[in-house]
């Protein structure tokens, strides 16, 4: 950032919330940029507002940007709307500003009845990776899903089906980047389009990747983050 100290990249993780899926991204960004991954409680039923309360005290006391992935997109938006001190920019990755699956909103109470076991973890991980599936990433994803209790995962899924932070997103004035996965089987392209219509100056970058973009193509993701920091963020 024009010779200034590089901002910390605060990562708000996806649905699992474990924070264990970013080692390769951290390696690609090191030593120039440091990741601070905020892992969420594994056994507490927290809604978006309560998770925001959990995040705030952990924010750095120096310049930082937020990288909000998937489930955490609304959290990144709500946080940015509060204009916390030292926040320089927001990156949204494979995410949404309101329920990304509107056709399923009426089935919110059916979420509790869905099966959730190791076999489901396995096939969910493979399906979301698509042709990018690897044994290493599959094992890591399955581990993350196994770490979190079933009630917590289902509670978070229900939060996704109810969320709408488009009003807050429209008020943002800081630099914005959206990393879109071209092969995303979960968060379809209309979600990024909706956000881009509200923020025409938002930089939208499409990468040939599955939903787990940061994990499947960490080098490409790191390059985009580096470019955003160096050319879009204003030094504080």
Image: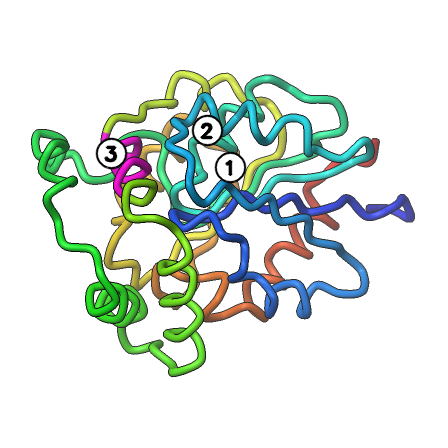
Residue at the image position 76 percent from the left and 56 percent from the top: 33
Would you say 63 lies left or right of 27 here? right
Percent position (x, y) of residue 75?
48, 31
Q: Earlier in the sequence, mark 3 or mark 1?
A: 3
Q: Which residue is mark 2?
A: 199
Q: Is residue 156 magenta?
A: yes
Percent position (x, y) of residue 228?
65, 49
Would you say 93 lies left or right of 164 here? right
Q: CA distance from mark 2 to mark 3?
A: 27 Å
Percent position (x, y) of residue 82?
59, 17
Determine the secondary structure under disc 2.
loop
As drawn, the label of residue 202 is: 1
- Residue 36 vs residue 64, the one in the foreground: 36
Q: Which residue is mark 3?
A: 158
Residue at the image position 30 percent from the left and 31 percent from the top: 159
Q: Most prominent secondary structure in the magenta stretch?
A: helix
Look at discs 2 and 3 and give the one toward the viewer: 3
Q: Is residue 188 magenta?
A: no
- Residue 140 vs residue 105, the one in the foreground: 140
Would you say 57 lies left or right of 137 here? right
Quadrant position of residue 66:
top right
Look at discs 3 and 1 and give the one toward the viewer: 3
């Amino acid at each position: 950032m024009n010779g200034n100290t590089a901002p910390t990249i605060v990562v708000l993780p996806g649905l699992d919330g474990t924070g264990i899926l970013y080692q390769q991204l951290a390696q690609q960004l090191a030593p120039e940029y440091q990741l601070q991954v905020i892992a969420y409680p594994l056994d507490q039923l927290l809604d978006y507002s309560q998770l925001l309360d959990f995040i705030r005290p952990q924010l750095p006391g120096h310049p930082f940007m937020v990288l909000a992935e998937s489930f955490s997109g609304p959290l990144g938006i709500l946080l940015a709307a509060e204009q916390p001190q030292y926040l320089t920019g927001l990156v949204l990755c494979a995410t949404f500003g309101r329920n990304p699956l509107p056709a399923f909103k009426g089935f919110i109470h059916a979420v509790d009845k869905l099966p959730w076991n190791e076999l489901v973890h396995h096939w969910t991980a493979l399906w979301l990776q698509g042709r990018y599936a690897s044994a290493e990433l599959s094992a890591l994803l399955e581990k993350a899903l196994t770490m979190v209790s079933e009630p917590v995962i289902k509670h978070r899924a229900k939060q996704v089906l109810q969320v709408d932070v488009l009003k807050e997103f429209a008020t943002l004035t800081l630099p914005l980047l959206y990393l879109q996965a071209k092969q995303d089987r979960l968060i379809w392209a209309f979600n990024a389009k909706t956000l881009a219509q509200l923020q025409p100056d938002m930089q939208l970058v499409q990468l040939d990747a599955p939903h787990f973009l940061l994990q499947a193509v960490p080098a490409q993701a790191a390059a985009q983050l580096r470019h955003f920091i160096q050319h879009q963020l204003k030094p504080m």
